[in-house]
Image: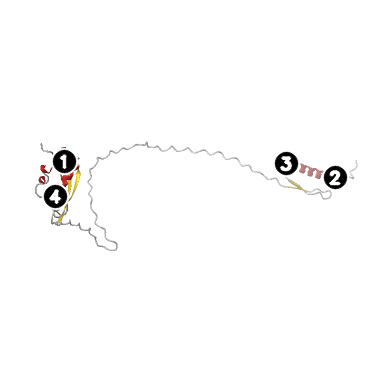
């Protein structure tokens, strides 16, 4: 056998080995998932650059922390109602103490309350009404019975009011309650006005003044 072509066979074997290594590297890069950037082939030479594999550190999860045992709750005192006895009522006395009067604004003087007004002096004379002179029963007598009323048998009670002047004479007569017979009432006022005399009324100053007088006459036929 001749070995004259041995160097050429060695170069061809080296080239085949290099291509095989490159293909193997590309296949490994594709299978393992690592990214690789392939540079465009220039001529018949293929250049490839690979990124080194990034090591991923996987952390083991921490063991769960055990909960600390809770402390026993403090004991709670039971609610206890305290009842206090009501004290006996004490009689109290209240005193009203008058306060001193306040001073006027801008002064320091004490203003005393006004003195009570003294009562008015009593009058020197006491007022009195008119007083009849003599016996009022003599102003009208049975003989004064009107003849017409007597024949008709009319009887009754006539009440009257007299106005007395300062001279003691009757100035007016008013029937305050009729006897039921106008003749008897008219006779009563006529007789009393003519016959009655009075002590005139006096005022608080002692001077004579007008007054009033009231009375009644019972008309009754003698039996």
Image position of 41 with respect to 108: above or below: above
- Which image quarter holds the C terminus? top left
**Mark closer to the observer (4, 2):** 4
Q: Earlier in the sequence, mark 1 or mark 4?
A: 1
The residue lying toward the viewer, choosing from 97 and 210, is 210
Q: Are marks 1 and 4 in contact (CB under 8 Å)?
A: no
Element under disc 2: helix
Q: Quadrant of residue 151?
A: top left
Element under disc 1: helix
Q: In the image, which disc is placed on residue 32? A: 3
Circle 4 is placed at which residue position?
194
Residue at (20%, 44%) from the top-left corner?
176
* Crowd tier of the residue under label 4, counting other residues whose Cα lies within 10 Å: few below 14, some 14–19, many 20 or above: few
Circle 2 is placed at which residue position?
12
Q: Earlier in the sequence, mark 2 or mark 1?
A: 2
Circle 1 is placed at which residue position?
148
| Residue 122, visible in the rendered structure | no
The residue lying toward the viewer, choosing from 220 and 62, is 220
Element under disc 4: helix
Element under disc 3: helix
Image position of 102 with respect to 173: above or below: below
* Crowd tier of the residue under label 1, counting other residues whose Cα lies within 10 Å: few below 14, some 14–19, many 20 or above: few
């Amino acid at each position: 056998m001749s070995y004259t072509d041995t160097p050429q066979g060695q170069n061809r074997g080296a080239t085949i080995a290099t291509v095989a290594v490159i293909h193997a590297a590309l296949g490994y890069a594709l299978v393992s998932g690592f990214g690789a950037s392939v540079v465009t082939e220039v001529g018949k030479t293929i250049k490839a650059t690979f990124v080194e594999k990034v090591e991923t550190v996987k952390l083991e999860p921490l063991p769960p922390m055990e909960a600390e045992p809770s402390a026993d709750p403090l004991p709670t005192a039971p609610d206890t109602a305290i009842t206090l006895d009501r004290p006996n009522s004490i009689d109290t006395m209240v005193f009203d103490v008058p306060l001193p009067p306040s001073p006027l604004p801008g002064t320091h003087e004490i203003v005393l309350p006004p003195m009570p007004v003294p009562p008015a002096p009593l009058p020197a004379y006491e007022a009195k009404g008119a007083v009849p002179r003599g016996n009022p029963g003599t102003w009208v007598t049975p003989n004064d019975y009107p003849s017409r009323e007597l024949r008709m048998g009319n009887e009754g009670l006539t009440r009257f009011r007299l106005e007395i002047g300062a001279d003691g004479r009757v100035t007016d007569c008013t029937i305050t309650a009729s006897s039921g017979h106008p003749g008897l009432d008219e006779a009563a006022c006529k007789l009393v006005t003519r016959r009655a005399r009075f002590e005139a009324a006096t005022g608080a100053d002692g001077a004579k003044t007008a007054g009033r007088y009231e009375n009644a006459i019972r008309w009754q036929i003698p039996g």
